């Protein structure tokens, strides 16, 4: 099946710094990628949808200036958490889908962000 | 807004059958998904329903009633490895956009 990777798998950063998380589709071209965050024992919350070559669409309540998303190629999307604070500590998961009418999303393994 | 409800936790015995319910109220509907997620890992796809009725796939089955805004995931012959969270997700936008909105997930514990 389709494989999606994320890097890094875990990151610890200091408050006020920025962190970049990469999401790659390894064996298919992802025209659309999605970014989710998940708090402990909670479900996934969709943060934004990014389409290759265009601006991301953010969900209500998600600050686009804080969570910068770039989908520069058909195999790579990045999420940058700017000026991170402890409340940004969470599990960030990306997913990807191909073009066309396929309904399935392929999830990456997630990135555990801890802000100290 | 989107509202997707599932029980928070369930416990079942190895070898038994368990049914996990999901009710939803969304502005639109273009399919319902069930995912399995082990702690600290990404969700894995289990099933997809877009029409009313039962979809069977091995030990797992999923049912949908669009008129009732209701779905369930049925797990048969439970195994210890089935202990995980089960996420119900609804796609509410037209085909192609594929945005998914997730319920809070049901944490299933299988006991010997």
Image (tube, coloured by chain):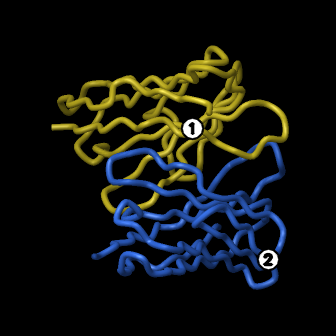
Q: Residue at x 54, y 80 (%)?
A: B19
- Where A58 falls versus B34 (above or below)? above
Q: Splitting the image into 4 quarters, where does residue A66 fall?
A: top left
Where does the image place residue A20, in percent across and percent down from the top left?
38, 23
Q: Splitting the image into 4 quarters, where does residue A50 fall?
A: top right
Q: Residue at x 55, y 57 (%)?
A: B35
Instruction: Give the mark count.
Output: 2
Q: Toward the viewer: B51 or A15?
A: B51
Cα distance between the residues tagged 1 and 2: 26 Å
Q: Secondary structure at mark 2?
A: loop
Identify residue for label 2: B66
Q: Is residue B14 left or right of residue B72?
A: left
On residue A95, the disc is 1
Where does the image place residue A36, in percent across and percent down from the top left?
49, 45
| Neighbour tally class for label 2: few under 14, some 14-19, many 20 plus, Cα within 10 Å | some
On residue B105, the disc is none
Asked if the residues shown at circle 1 and circle 2 are in contact, with their CB atoms under 8 angstroms apart, the answer is no
| Neighbour tally class for label 1: few under 14, some 14-19, many 20 plus, Cα within 10 Å | many
- Where B111 falls versus A39 (above or below)? below
What chain does mark 1 sit on?
Answer: A
Quadrant for the C terminus of chain B, please: bottom left
Task: Determine the residue located farthest toward the top in the rendered image.
Answer: A73
Q: Splitting the image into 4 quarters, where does residue A100 fall?
A: top right
Q: Residue at x 67, y 26 (%)?
A: A30
Where does the image place residue B89, in percent across and percent down from the top left?
61, 61
What chain does mark 2 sit on?
Answer: B
Where does the image place residue A69, in percent across and percent down from the top left?
53, 28
Q: Secondary structure at mark 1?
A: strand
Apparent colour of chain A: yellow
Q: Is residue A7 left or right of residue A75?
A: left
Apparent colour of chain B: blue
Quadrant for the N terminus of chain B, please: bottom right
């Amino acid at each position: 099946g389709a494989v999606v990777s994320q890097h890094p798998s875990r990151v610890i950063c200091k408050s006020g710094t920025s962190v970049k998380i990469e999401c790659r589709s390894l064996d298919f071209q992802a025209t659309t990628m999605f970014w989710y965050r998940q708090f402990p024992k909670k479900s996934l919350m969709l943060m934004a949808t990014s389409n290759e070559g265009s601006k991301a669409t953010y969900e209500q309540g998600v600050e686009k200036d804080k969570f910068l998303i770039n989908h520069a190629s058909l195999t790579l999307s990045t999420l940058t958490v700017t000026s991170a604070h402890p409340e940004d500590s969470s599990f960030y998961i990306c997913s990807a889908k191909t073009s066309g009418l396929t309904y399935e999303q392929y999830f990456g393994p997630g990135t555990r962000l801890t802000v100290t | 807004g989107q509202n997707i409800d599932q029980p928070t936790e369930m416990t079942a015995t190895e070898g038994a059958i368990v049914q996990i319910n999901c009710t939803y109220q969304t502005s639109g509907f273009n399919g319902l998904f069930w995912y399995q997620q082990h702690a600290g890992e990404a969700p894995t796809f289990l099933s997809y329903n877009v029409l009313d009725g039962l979809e069977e796939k091995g030990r797992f089955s999923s049912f949908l009633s669009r008129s009732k805004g209701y779905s369930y995931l049925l797990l048969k012959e439970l195994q210890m490895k089935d202990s995980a969270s089960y996420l119900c997700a609804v796609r509410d936008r037209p085909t192609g956009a594929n945005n998914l909105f997730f319920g809070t997930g049901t944490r299933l514990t299988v006991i010997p």
